[in-house]
């Protein structure tokens, strides 16, 4: 893979060379590393010993730990330190002269400067992105390089469109399985979005669908949705897509009171067609522990009654209306025809999707879809990066 990988890392990943170690010393049980850019790391011996990736401490095939924390003396201290000819930090420990070797790029990334995120999100309105980032299959085929670009676009913009695909029934499942394992829900594993008399969702009618995320009725809604257009002969049925994170960010600036409500008031969504009875309560805008945007949950046509005082209900509706108005306005919502052979893949916990009504008497319309989880996309991006590196 590369010379740098002569020095192993716990994940066996290629860590591009970054900083070299200028000097190292032990001070009062801490291992002090001075880097050649003058930055310093103060490393705990327990942390270093725990991260040893030699064959005794880490299974070399599973890349899982063999070393058990309980077997490391709680008061462990390094016996001696050395920087070897390849620049690795070598530490000898008292137990049977055990030696750990640390790749400097790995050590730097894990103690000074974490690597840049795999993909950085870019929030968009229609001024920035009037239509989905679009990629074209070649002779109906999706190469790994094309798949990589598609997945990076999903990470960055929350969505991608692939065109010029065949309209086979198997396509959407085959495509999803190239990325990860299908995330099954209480709807069909692979579902056909067609107008039918006995559907258990408004999606299975020809009605207009306002901007929504699928299945917030579940504790963990599917992270990725894939829709493949197989037949597009009906009048209408245009696709609608909104960056829910951009809407959230703009509401935070323009209407901070509503933002507070949207991040705290829990709405309940319920699948009521029975016999299944999934329901879950959560805020419209979900934040992570650091207060960063984690997810949007909004399915207007599956919303259950809100519990709360008269005043709380007034504000909850006002805030939700504010979100829905933006999410369905041309400033935020792109609208584009969904042609046969097109496939859309998007982050169902960030991007709100919808469609205009269509006339089922004017012709057929058939989409086929399925779900994955968000981290399937991230894992596949890493896997492809690794594959491209080893090919090069
Ligand atoms: C759905 C859905 C959009 C469409 O199936 O959840 O929103 O274009 N479909 O039919
Ligand atoms: Zn070891
Ligand atoms: Zn939907």
Image: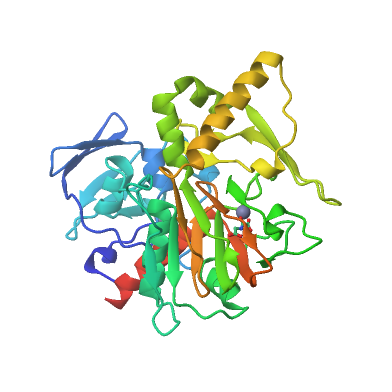
Q: Position of residue 249 (x, y in %)?
A: 41, 34
Asked whether residue 214 is in view, the answer is yes
Front residue of 144 and 247: 247
Q: Is residue 371 left or right of residue 19?
A: right
Q: Is residue 376 left or right of residue 310?
A: left
Residue at image point 56% right, 70% down: 229
On-image quarter of the C terminus: bottom left
Asked whether residue 213 is in view, the answer is no
Front residue of 72 and 221: 221
Q: Position of residue 202 (x, y in %)?
A: 71, 53
On-image quarter of the N terminus: bottom left
Residue at image point 80% right, 62% down: 197
Query: What scheme was used to colour the molecule?
Result: rainbow
Residue at image point 52% right, 58% down: 239
Q: Is residue 16 left or right of residue 203?
A: left
Residue 166 against residue 68 in the figure, above or below:
below
Q: Position of residue 51 (x, y in %)?
A: 41, 49
Q: Position of residue 373 (x, y in %)?
A: 56, 56
Residue 17, located in which quarter of the rendered image? bottom left
Residue 129 against residue 194 in the figure, above or below:
above
Front residue of 288 and 51: 288
Q: Is residue 369 left or right of residue 345?
A: right
State the residue lying farthest toward the front: 362
State the residue lying farthest toward the bottom: 139
């Amino acid at each position: 893979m590369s010379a740098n990988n002569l020095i192993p890392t716990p994940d066996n990943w290629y860590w591009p060379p970054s900083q070299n170690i200028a000097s190292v010393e032990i001070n009062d049980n801490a291992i002090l590393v001075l880097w050649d850019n003058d930055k310093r790391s103060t490393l705990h011996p327990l942390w270093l010993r725990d991260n040893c990736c030699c064959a005794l401490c880490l299974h070399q095939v599973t890349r899982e730990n063999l070393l058990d924390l309980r077997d490391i003396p709680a008061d462990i201290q390094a016996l001696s330190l050395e920087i070897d000819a390849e620049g690795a930090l070598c530490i000898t420990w008292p137990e049977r002269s055990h030696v750990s070797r640390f790749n400097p790029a790995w050590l730097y990334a894990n103690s000074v400067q974490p690597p840049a995120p795999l993909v950085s999100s870019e929030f968009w309105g229609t001024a920035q992105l009037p239509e989905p980032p679009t990629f074209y299959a070649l002779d109906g085929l999706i190469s790994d390089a094309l798949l990589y670009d598609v997945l990076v676009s999903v990470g960055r913009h929350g969505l991608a469109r692939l065109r010029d695909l065949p309209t086979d029934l198997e396509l959407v499942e085959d495509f999803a399985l190239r990325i990860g394992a299908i995330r099954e829900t209480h709807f069909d594993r692979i579902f056909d979005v067609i107008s039918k008399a006995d559907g258990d969702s408004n999606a299975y009618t020809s009605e207009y669908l306002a901007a929504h995320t699928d299945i917030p009725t579940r504790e963990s809604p599917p992270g990725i949705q894939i829709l493949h257009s197989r037949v597009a002969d009906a009048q209408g049925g245009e696709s609608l897509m909104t960056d829910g994170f951009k809407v959230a960010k703009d509401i935070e600036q323009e209407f901070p009171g509503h933002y507070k409500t949207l991040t705290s008031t829990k709405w309940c969504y319920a699948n009521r067609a029975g016999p299944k009875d999934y329901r879950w309560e959560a805020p419209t805008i979900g934040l992570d522990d650091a207060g960063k945007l984690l997810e949007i949950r909004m399915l207007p046509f599956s919303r259950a009654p809100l519990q709360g005082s008269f005043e709380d209900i007034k504000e909850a509706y006002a805030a939700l209306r504010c979100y829905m108005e933006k999410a369905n306005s041309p400033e935020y919502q792109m609208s584009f025809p969904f042609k046969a052979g097109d496939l859309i893949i998007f982050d169902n916990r960030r991007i709100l999707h919808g469609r205009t009504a269509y006339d089922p008497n004017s012709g057929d319309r058939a989409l086929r879809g399925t779900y994955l989880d968000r981290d399937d996309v991230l894992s596949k991006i890493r896997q492809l990066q690794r594959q491209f590196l080893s090919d090069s």
